[in-house]
């Protein structure tokens, strides 16, 4: 099992920045990739950014150039630096960890990000 705990959400004005953190614990050696998803009210949960154990990254087109995902392997923590935030970035952001071999997903409880115009 893997446990994920997010922190760092909150309210920010458009154009501002926030950094989300996701601390992983448990069987972390089994994790192949970690990432962030978001879900706005009435919408599906979509991938925002991901990073593999090898350091490869992937971003949604809507956040490219504004968001950066990174990881600290010593602290077992993944970060999402969000700059130039827009009102449409408002959502609950969920941390995700994947085990490719078994197709297993682990989820955090979510962190609300609200961007005011």
Image (cartoon, rainbow, N blue to C red):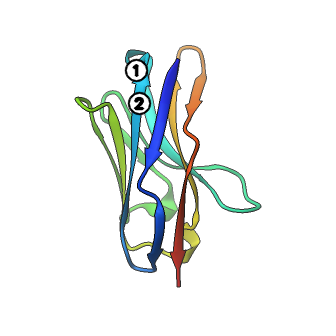
Q: In the image, 39: left or right of 75?
A: right
Q: Position of residue 72 (x, y in %)?
A: 26, 36
Quarter residue 91 falls in: bottom right
Residue 48 badge: none
Distance from label 2 to label 1 (Cα)?
A: 7 Å
Nearer to us in this view, 71 or 112? 112
Quarter residue 78 falls in: top left
Q: Position of residue 20 (x, y in %)?
A: 40, 53
Identify the secondary structure beneath mark 1: helix
In the image, what residue occupies the spot 44% across and 72% down?
85
Compared to 22, does 87 lie above or below? below
Nearer to us in this view, 62 or 69? 69
Identify the secondary structure beneath mark 2: strand
In the image, what residue occupies the spot 45% across and 80% down?
14
Q: Mark 1 = which residue?
A: 28
Kindly indicate whether the residue at mark 1 contacts the one at mark 2 (C-beta within 8 angstroms): yes
Q: How many marks?
A: 2
Q: Looking at the image, which residue sits at the far right? A: 42
Q: Position of residue 42 (x, y in %)?
A: 77, 61
Q: For mark 2, does the 10 Å Cα neighbourhood hold few (<14), some (14 to 19), or many (20 or more) residues?
A: many
In the image, what residue occupies the spot 40% across and 79% down?
15
Nearer to us in this view, 109 or 95? 109
Residue 24 badge: 2
Compared to 113, does 111 lie above or below? above
Q: In the image, 4: left or right of 71?
A: right
Compared to 6, does 11 lie above or below? below
Q: Looking at the image, which residue sits at the far bottom? A: 117
In the image, what residue occupies the spot 40% across and 20% down?
28
Q: Position of residue 1 (x, y in %)?
A: 53, 17
């Amino acid at each position: 099992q893997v446990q994920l705990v997010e922190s760092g959400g909150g309210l920010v004005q458009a154009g501002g920045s926030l950094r989300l953190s996701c601390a992983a614990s448990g069987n972390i050696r089994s994790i192949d990739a970690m990432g962030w998803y978001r879900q706005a009210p009435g919408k599906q949960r979509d991938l925002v950014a991901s990073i593999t154990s090898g350091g490869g990254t992937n971003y949604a087109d809507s956040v490219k150039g504004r968001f950066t995902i990174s990881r600290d392997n010593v602290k077992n923590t993944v970060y999402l630096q969000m700059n130039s935030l827009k009102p449409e970035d408002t959502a609950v952001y969920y941390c995700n960890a994947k085990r490719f071999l078994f197709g297993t997903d682990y989820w955090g409880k979510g962190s609300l990000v609200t961007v005011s115009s």
